[in-house]
């Protein structure tokens, strides 16, 4: 019985001594740190947090030779295009942007030019591939008429298309040929209306791109001229305008779902803004070796290699001639 009562008492004393030791350590530790020359606040200071690692999918900045950094679309929903901006039609007729839009129907605004090496053709091909389906009866985007499949949106009847040519020096013949190429993609029963409803606009004065730039700036369409390639770097976008010329939606990319186009035209018709759709694409040919020393280095290597070959053959020729000059004299007659 005595041994069983002594063990709990010993355990209790151990707990008391442990708590007293911890308290004493908490009091004496700061004083010991001061004695060693360390301020108390540095003793228990936590280690600084490590800087966050850069994400693996971080996109590095483009090199200095990349000239299309500013080519993008700054979305200006609710902005009004300058209706007084002056142009010429594909037939050479002077016209303002307001006259081209008409003021009665919503419109799709595009920026293109005939000598574009890639994206303009792809964009307009994608648009004209979707428009015939938009011009046939489909599901109405009107929420007051759900499920009704009699909604029809045809160029020239329910909306217009205005294409502004980015090239200030574009000729009328090129603009007209470009327009005819895409009008030919419409079904026969839609072609006449499309011809009346799709206008190509050229610079009012050949070589003067001020009007083009003015409209592009109003809708946030950023483009630039690449002198080395004589090309315009530009994004691919359809810009929906209300009948009053107010931006209601941006459609990025080169492929367009007919249902999405139908809904976008409908909302432009009631001047209702909508969120952008698609992904930004740029028309720009980037040569990473352009404006650098890479080509000069390659040329230097070629010249060096050619010089080495010339020296090598010259040395071999000299060696051959020296050996011919050191042949032993002929033996006297009768001596073998």
Image (cartoon, rainbow, N blue to C red):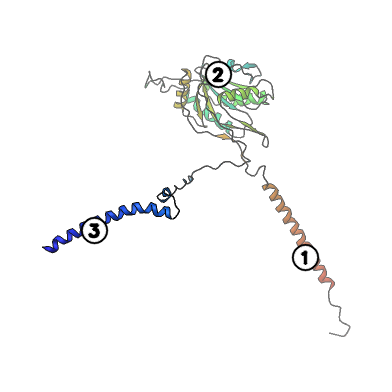
Q: Earlier in the sequence, mark 1 or mark 2?
A: 2
Quarter of the image that includes the N terminus:
bottom left
Question: Which residue is pictured at 16% across the width and 61% down the height?
Answer: 6
Residue 128 on image: x %, y %: 53, 27
Other-residue count near label 3 (Cα within 10 Å), few / some / many at <14 / 14–19 / ≥20: few
- Pair 1/2: label in front: 1
Element class at badge 2 = helix
Residue 143 on image: x %, y %: 38, 20
Other-residue count near label 1 (Cα within 10 Å), few / some / many at <14 / 14–19 / ≥20: few
Residue under numbered circle 1: 316
Name the residue furthest right.
333
Quarter of the image that includes the C terminus:
bottom right
Residue 180 on image: x %, y %: 60, 24
Q: CA distance from mark 3 to mark 2?
A: 97 Å
Question: Which residue is pictured at 66% across the width and 23% down the height?
Answer: 172
Name the residue furthest left.
1
Dividing the picture into quadrants, the one containing residue 118 is: top right
Considering only vertical position in the picture, is 187 above or below 306? above
Q: Earlier in the sequence, mark 1 or mark 3?
A: 3
Dividing the picture into quadrants, the one containing residue 168 is: top right
Element class at badge 3 = helix
Q: CA distance from mark 1 to mark 3?
A: 98 Å
Relative depth, front residue between 64 and 307: 64
Relative depth, front residue between 47 and 237: 47
Considering only vertical position in the picture, is 326 above or below 198? below
Q: Earlier in the sequence, mark 3 or mark 2?
A: 3
Considering only vertical position in the picture, is 99 above or below 62? above
- Pair 1/3: label in front: 3
Residue under numbered circle 3: 14
Residue 88 on image: x %, y %: 64, 19
User: What numbered label is drawn on residue 197?
Assistant: 2
């Amino acid at each position: 019985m005595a041994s069983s009562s002594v063990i709990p008492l010993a355990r209790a004393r151990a707990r008391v001594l442990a708590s007293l030791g911890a308290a004493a350590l908490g009091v004496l530790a700061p004083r010991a740190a001061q004695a060693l020359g360390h301020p108390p606040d540095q003793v228990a200071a936590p280690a600084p947090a490590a800087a966050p690692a850069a994400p693996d999918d971080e996109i590095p900045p483009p090199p200095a030779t990349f000239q299309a950094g500013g080519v993008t679309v700054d979305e200006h929903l609710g902005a009004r295009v300058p209706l007084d901006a002056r142009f010429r039609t594909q037939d050479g007729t002077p016209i303002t942007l307001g006259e081209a839009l008409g003021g009665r129907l919503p419109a799709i605004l595009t920026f293109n030019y005939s000598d574009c090496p890639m994206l303009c053709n792809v964009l307009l091909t994608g648009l004209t591939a979707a428009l015939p389906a938009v011009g046939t009866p489909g599901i109405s985007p009107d929420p007051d008429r759900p499920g009704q499949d009699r909604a029809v949106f045809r160029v020239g009847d329910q909306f217009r298309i205005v294409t502004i040519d980015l090239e200030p020096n574009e000729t009328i013949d090129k603009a007209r040929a470009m327009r005819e190429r895409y009008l030919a993609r419409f079904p026969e029963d839609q072609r006449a209306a499309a011809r009346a409803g799709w206008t190509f606009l050229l610079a009012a004065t050949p070589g003067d791109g001020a009007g083009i730039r003015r409209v592009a700036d109003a809708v946030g369409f950023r483009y630039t001229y690449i002198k080395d390639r004589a090309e315009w770097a530009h994004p691919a976008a359809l810009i929906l305008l209300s009948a009053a010329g107010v931006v209601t939606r941006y459609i990025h990319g080169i492929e367009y779902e007919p249902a999405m186009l139908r809904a976008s035209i409908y909302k432009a018709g009631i001047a209702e803004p909508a969120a952008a759709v698609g992904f930004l694409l740029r028309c720009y040919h980037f040569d990473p070796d352009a404006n650098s020393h890479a080509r000069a280095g390659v040329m230097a290597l070629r010249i060096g290699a050619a010089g080495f070959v010339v020296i090598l053959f010259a040395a071999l020729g000299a060696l051959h001639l020296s050996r011919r000059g050191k042949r032993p004299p002929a033996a006297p007659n009768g001596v073998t």
